[in-house]
């Protein structure tokens, strides 16, 4: 549904900022909107001019978050929804659904330790998505992403609504970290940096491809290894620094907002929107894999290949496969047995 906003104040603002003259109406929901990620993500999505309706859903505390965010001077109308009985209303008509619902890690835990709680949460939310907005593009943030994305796929398959182009695991934070760490080491402006990160979103399954990083810096092998390890351990670095008070929330909200913006741009027909994401894939023998994807009017229009890898990256790719395979299988099994 397109609405010409060119003559309105909001429309003039959009034109000044280089957006198209006709901006489609787009409804975005954040599920888990009152949480550590959900709140700053709600703020960032409220600031996004491509959003016309913002639905903030959680099992508690969303009325306050929604009232607060709704006073901000931007295009979207904001509504808060609380409790399962309001989930359907939150989801109806959604174009993009972002899911940061679930428990975060504490020091000493792996992302897989969150499986027992988060798998059930994600399964319930995805069943509701299948019912109320089966065509929405789902951005899965809840951990363990390597398992929650396969769970979502199985739920959608069972509901006969599965479209692999509409399900994305959000791995943008790995890219955000790789860029920052590379820029620091290479002494270049982070705004100019690009680093693809492939594989999955946990420990060694996170594989940054620094051999493809731009601008080229010809860093020595020890630096590349240290940067790779720091990117793989980036989440743990934050979990330990927060010392029991959760995991990355602000950088994740930033990363989630970048990915959701890319999805919206793709849906609206912007050309050449490419981000890394954990999606259904044939890039390797694994059924899900993170790599660069092209986002378009139907979601993931194209899953891009890995490009040339260094010997070190080739080894990393082989080493990550068993863990990633077992996390994917764990998700599929859970979705089908319960
Ligand atoms: N993909 C990534 O890169 C990435 C990065 C950081 C965190 N995470 C993950 O995101 C998740 C959320 O992290 P957080 O720090 O915001 O946690 P948090 O505990 O601060 O917030 C989670 C929110 O989810 C809500 N919630 C729980 N069950 C729900 C349900 N059934 N429906 C709707 N909402 C529900 C809670 O009420 C809470 O407000 C965790 O699983 C964390 O591991 C992923
Ligand atoms: O590390 C975590 O548990 C949260 C998230 O996956 C991250 O990478 O920050």
Image (tube, rainbow, N blue to C red):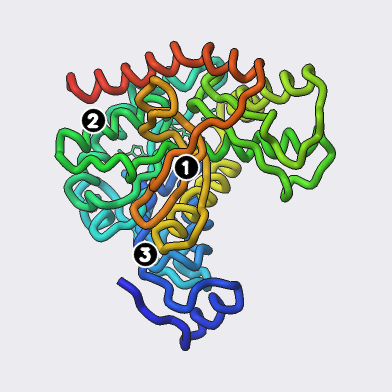
- Residue at the bottom extreme? 7
Q: Is residue 41 above or below residue 182?
A: below
Res. 293 mark:
1
Image side of residue 75 versus residue 249, left or right: left
Q: Residues within 10 Å of mark 2 (few under 14, many from 20)?
A: many
Q: Residues within 10 Å of mark 1 (few under 14, many from 20)?
A: many
Q: Position of residue 189 (x, y in %)?
A: 79, 47
- Assess whether mark 3 and mark 1 are in contact (beta carbons under 8 angstroms): no
Quadrant placement of the N terminus: bottom left
The span from disc 1 to disc 3 (Cα, nearest Å) is 21 Å
* Secondary structure found at label 1: strand
Q: Nearer the viewer, mark 1 or mark 2?
A: 1
Q: Position of residue 154 (x, y in %)?
A: 23, 30
Res. 154 mark:
2
* Secondary structure found at label 2: helix
- Residue at numbered disc 3: 26
Who comes first in sequence, dot 1 or dot 3? 3
Q: Is the residue indicated by label 3 positioned so its CB lies within 8 Å of ligand 1?
A: no
- Residue at the right extreme? 187
Q: Is residue 117 above or below residue 29?
A: above
């Amino acid at each position: 549904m397109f609405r010409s906003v060119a003559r309105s104040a909001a429309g003039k603002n959009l034109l000044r900022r280089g957006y198209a003259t006709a901006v489609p109406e787009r409804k975005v929901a954040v599920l888990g909107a009152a949480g550590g990620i959900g709140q700053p993500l709600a703020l960032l999505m409220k600031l996004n001019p491509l959003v016309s309706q913002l639905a903030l859903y959680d099992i508690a505390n969303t009325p306050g978050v929604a009232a607060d965010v709704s006073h901000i001077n931007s295009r979207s109308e904001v509504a808060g929804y609380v409790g399962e009985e309001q989930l359907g209303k939150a989801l109806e008509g959604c174009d993009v659904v972002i899911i940061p619902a679930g428990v975060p890690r504490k020091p000493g835990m792996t992302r897989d330790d969150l499986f027992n709680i988060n798998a059930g949460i994600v399964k319930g939310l995805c069943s509701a998505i299948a019912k109320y907005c089966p065509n929405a593009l789902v951005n899965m943030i809840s951990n363990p992403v390597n398992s929650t994305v396969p769970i979502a796929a199985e739920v959608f398959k069972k509901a006969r609504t599965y479209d692999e182009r509409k399900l994305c695991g959000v791995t943008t934070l790995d890219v955000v970290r790789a860029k920052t760490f590379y820029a620091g080491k290479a002494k270049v402006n982070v705004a100019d940096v690009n680093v693809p990160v492939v594989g999955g979103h946990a420990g060694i399954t996170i594989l940054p491809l620094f051999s493809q990083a731009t601008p080229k810096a010809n860093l020595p092998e020890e630096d590349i290894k240290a940067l790779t390890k720091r990117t793989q351990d980036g989440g743990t670095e934050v979990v330990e620094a927060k010392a029991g008070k959760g995991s990355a929330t602000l950088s994740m909200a930033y990363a989630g907002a970048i990915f959701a913006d890319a999805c919206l741009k793709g849906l609206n027909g912007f050309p050449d929107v490419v981000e890394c994401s954990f999606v259904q894939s044939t890039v390797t023998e694994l059924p899900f894999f993170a790599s660069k994807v092209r986002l378009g009017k139907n979601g993931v229009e194209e899953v891009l290949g890995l490009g040339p890898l260094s010997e070190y990256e080739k080894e990393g790719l082989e080493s990550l496969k068993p863990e990633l395979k077992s996390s994917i299988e764990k998700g599929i099994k859970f979705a089908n047995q319960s």
